[in-house]
Structures are given as C-alpha cells and as structure tokens.
C-alpha cells in the first residue's frame, strides 16, 4: 500500500510531495495531463513564499530564474512602495512564471524520490478505515493510506469525496493568454497606459521574444467555461482599446472569473484537500499559487507525522483549523479587490480614496502583510504576539536560521543553553546560540516555520513539545 497519493501535479501537489518525502513518506503524484500546459496563471512568489523556499534550501534556484520586485499594497490595482518595518529578512517577491515554478518543484521532487505519474486521471474513489482506493481512467486501481486532492478548482477528488463547495458564482470574466502582436511596442505601451486609467482588468505585458501576456475583460460570463478563441481576444481588445494590436500565434488562451468558493471541509476521513481544490477566488493580488504552496507547507509535516505514527491527537485536524480561516480571509479580500477594480465612477472614487489611505505607512504595512501572508497569525491560544506567527530568518553564530530548517524538522532555538528536547530528538533539533536578533530566551519553531512556543521554562516547553510533536521517547535509565 502506498503511503500517500497526491492527485494533481501543479505547484501545490508538488510542494506537498516534496514535504512528505523529506520525512521519508512514500508518495505517488497522479497528474491527469501528459505534459505541462505552459499556462502561466500564477506569476510569482510573495515574501512569505520566498521564506518558504529559503527554509527548504530552494531559494537560490528560484532567484536564478526570477526577477525580484518590491511593491507594497498590490491591492485592487493600488500599488505603493514596499513599506518599512515588515517582519521578514526577505522584503521582496519573485516574479516567476508558473511553468518555471512547476519545473523547479518537479526537479526537486525527482531528487527526493517522488513518483510522478503523468496521464493518470482519477475517476473513482472509495475509502475505509485503513485507506483510500482510487480508480483511474482505463480501469486500473491504486490503494494508499492517505489521499490529498490538489487537482484544482474543478477538483474530481473534492466531488468524489462529497465535499460541498459553497460560495458565489462569477459575475464577470477576464480573458488571459500569451500571444504575439504586430503593433509597434511603443504604440502598445501608449494605448495600454491610456486604457488602464479607467480599466484595470486590461493589459498587454511584454514576455520577451515578441510575446505578450494579454488581459482583457470578456464579453460576459460563459456558462461552459470553454477556452476562448483568438477571435474572442481580438473582438474584446477592439471593444475595450479600439484596436486588436494585430495579436496572433497564441501559445495558450484561458479565462477566469470572480467566483469565490471554499470547501466546507479540508478533510474527510483519509482524504484531504489543498490549493484550488479547497478554495477558488479571482487572481487579484497574486495570492492563489502562494496560498496553495502554503497549504502544502502546513499540511506536509502533519500528514507525515500521521504516517510515521507519532502525530499527537488533533494534529492533522489542525490543518483545517488553521488553513480554512486563511482561505476565507483571502476570498474576502479578493472580493474587495474586484470592487476596487471596477470601471464605474463609484469603484473609481473608492479606489482613489483607498490609494490615499495607502499613503499612511501603517495602512501600507497592514495591506502588504495581508497580501504577502506575512501578517498571518495562527491561533495557538493565549501568549505573546509572536506566538503563532512565522519566525523570520536570523543570523546565527554560524550561518542563518533558515539554513537549519532544510530537513523539515521542528527546531528549538535556545539562547539559554539550559533547556532540553532530548526525548524528542528524533523529531526536533536543538540549537544553542546567543542570537541577539531573537527577542525571547528560546523559541520552538514548527517545521512550517511558525512559532509554537517561546520562553525559558522547561515545563512549558515540555507541554509545547508534547502538543505539537507527540509522546516523548522513553526516559533512559
């Protein structure tokens, strides 16, 4: 029996597979497509996802093929300078096309021994107390102890598991594609700048090699969500901009709407959901791919703990408890952004007011924290403000903190040298370092980089270790 089946080989599924393999879990990824599509809906990594990649030793791979950007706000078309005082050693994002992100994660998954099987479409699913059995198109079957659906907004796993997907249907749609254009680049830039004064769901963004990423409002909301044609783009470009720019030779064409939906449950027995299978929303603010990667980062170590047999009671259920509110929050902020993007006088006036509010540094920090997930605080109970927040990278006597997190284990960063994690040594590393950047005497960091405890009391530390890392090893005589 396979330990974990991951359905879907996009960024979420690949990130999850990598996380599981770091714990030695056997993983098979089933991807319906025989080859990557080349579509680039996700355009990069926000600061928190940059931290995630650094914590797993992947950041330099991304930096080598990405462009760094520092934009504050990024909310409903309102852009400001990156605010001072953000709690991160990585105050930037990386512009990385989604196909590149998928390639880098697939390469890492291969290095870790993930079994990625393309051309495998799941058509049936049944689970019992011991595991999950899936049926593939063609009639073959696979059985695993756990299954995670990372198969997108139209998730087959979610449907077969009987999970409701309530929310709001699309009211507007936008065409998105990559294609060439015969119009002079300076003329394109001039027209785009003029149109974007009133229509923010529009743009022709140079992609290199004469290609453009084209964004234009659709004529209406399609009922069948069929892929648009090149003529659809030409017609809408003429309607919005007065010219179709001579677009031709598309590499890919797609559409997206402003629908917002969220799975009622992220876990049903031995089936879990992550990424777009758990939540869909407009791509405003560039949060979708990032939230999926961070779903996987939260889930990976918890599911591995279940497979390995040391997970404390409730650990796996904390995945839903922690990530479902995050999804709901992102759905809410994307609804607000769609309102700000409107071309009518009301939304335009609201956008102007919002832009002026963003000139206040504290407002810019707050909004930037929302979009980048740097402001996220999980509810771990009463405690200092740092409890439940991500631990920023800090300089150690020898190297950096994030360099010590590549193996996805828990970590106690201890300035006192008086604390012990010996009975959890198979799950938690103990690093004694004076670390002047650390505000507390000691910090217990979960494998996903969030602060699980801070202080200097051994009894409190023992309770936190038991809560997050299970029953300790027997005391040696």
Image: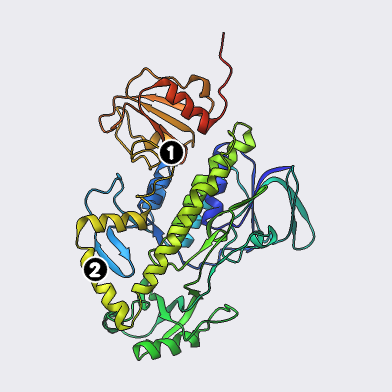
Q: Give x and y (percent) for residue 153.
A: 56, 65
The residue lying toward the viewer, choosing from 127 and 242, is: 127
Q: Residue at x 74, y 42 (%)?
A: 130
Q: Residue furthest front?
A: 382
Q: Decide if residue 95 is in sight here.
A: yes
Residue 129 quadrant:
top right
Q: Which residue is mark 1?
A: 381
Q: Decide if residue 108 is in sight here.
A: no
10 Å neighbourhood of mark 1: few (<14), some, or many (≥20)?
few
Tell me the element at label 2: helix
Tell me the element at label 1: loop
10 Å neighbourhood of mark 2: few (<14), some, or many (≥20)?
some
Image quarter (top left, top right, bottom left or bottom right) of the C terminus: top right
Q: Residue at x 44, y 43 (%)?
A: 379
Q: Give x and y (percent) for residue 333.
A: 39, 63
Q: Give x and y (percent) for residue 350.
A: 28, 74
Q: CA distance from mark 1 to mark 2?
A: 35 Å
Which of the two labelled residues, at mark 1 and mark 2, occupies the earlier sequence position? 2
Vertical comparison of 15 with 248: above or below: above
Q: Give x and y (percent) for residue 143.
A: 74, 48
Vertical comparison of 154 with 201: above or below: above
Q: Which residue is mark 2?
A: 355
């Amino acid at each position: 029996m396979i330990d974990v089946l991951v359905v879907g080989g996009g960024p979420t599924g690949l990130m999850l597979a990598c996380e599981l393999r770091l714990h030695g879990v056997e993983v098979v990824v089933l991807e319906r497509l025989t080859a990557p599509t080349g579509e680039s809906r996700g355009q990069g990594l926000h600061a928190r996802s940059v931290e995630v990649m650094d914590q797993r030793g992947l950041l330099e791979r991304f930096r080598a093929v990405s462009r760094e950007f520092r934009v504050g706000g990024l909310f409903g078309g309102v852009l400001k300078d990156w605010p001072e005082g953000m709690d991160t050693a990585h105050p930037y994002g990386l512009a990385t096309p989604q196909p590149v992100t998928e390639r880098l994660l697939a390469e890492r998954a291969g290095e870790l021994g993930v079994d990625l099987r393309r051309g495998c479409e799941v058509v049936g699913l049944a689970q019992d107390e011991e595991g999950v059995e899936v049926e593939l198109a063609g009639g073959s079957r696979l059985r695993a102890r756990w299954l995670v659906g990372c198969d997108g907004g139209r998730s087959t796993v979610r449907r077969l598991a009987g999970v409701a997907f309530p929310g709001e249907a699309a009211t507007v749609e936008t065409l998105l594609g990559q294609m060439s254009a015969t119009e002079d680049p300076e003329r394109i830039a001039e027209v785009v700048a003029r149109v974007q004064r009133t229509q923010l769901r529009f743009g022709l963004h140079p992609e290199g090699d004469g290609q453009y990423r084209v964004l234009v409002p659709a004529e209406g909301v399609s009922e069948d969500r069929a892929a648009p044609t090149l003529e659809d783009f030409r017609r809408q470009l003429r309607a919005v901009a007065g010219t179709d720019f001579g677009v031709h030779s598309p590499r890919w064409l797609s559409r997206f709407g402003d629908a917002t939906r969220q799975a009622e449950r992220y876990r049903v027995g031995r089936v879990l959901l992550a990424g777009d299978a758990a939540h869909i929303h407009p791509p405003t603010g560039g949060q979708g791919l990032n939230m999926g990667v961070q779903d996987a980062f939260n889930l990976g170590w918890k599911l591995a703990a279940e497979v390995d047999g040391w997970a404390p009671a409730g650990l796996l259920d904390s995945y839903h408890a922690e990530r479902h509110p995050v999804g709901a929050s992102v759905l809410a902020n994307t609804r607000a952004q769609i309102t700000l993007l409107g071309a009518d006088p009301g939304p335009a006036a609201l956008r102007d007011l919002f832009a002026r509010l963003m000139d206040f540094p504290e407002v810019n920090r707050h909004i930037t924290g929302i979009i980048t997930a740097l402001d996220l605080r999980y509810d771990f109970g009463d405690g200092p403000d740092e409890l439940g927040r991500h631990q920023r990278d800090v300089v150690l006597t020898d190297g950096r903190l994030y360099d010590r997190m590549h193996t996805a284990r828990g970590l106690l960063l201890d300035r006192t040298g008086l604390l012990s994690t010996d009975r959890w040594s198979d799950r938690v590393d103990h690093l004694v370092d004076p670390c002047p950047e650390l505000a507390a005497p000691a910090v217990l960091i979960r494998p996903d980089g969030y602060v699980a405890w801070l202080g200097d009391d051994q009894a409190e530390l023992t309770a936190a270790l038991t809560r997050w890392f299970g029953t300790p090893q027997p005391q040696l005589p």
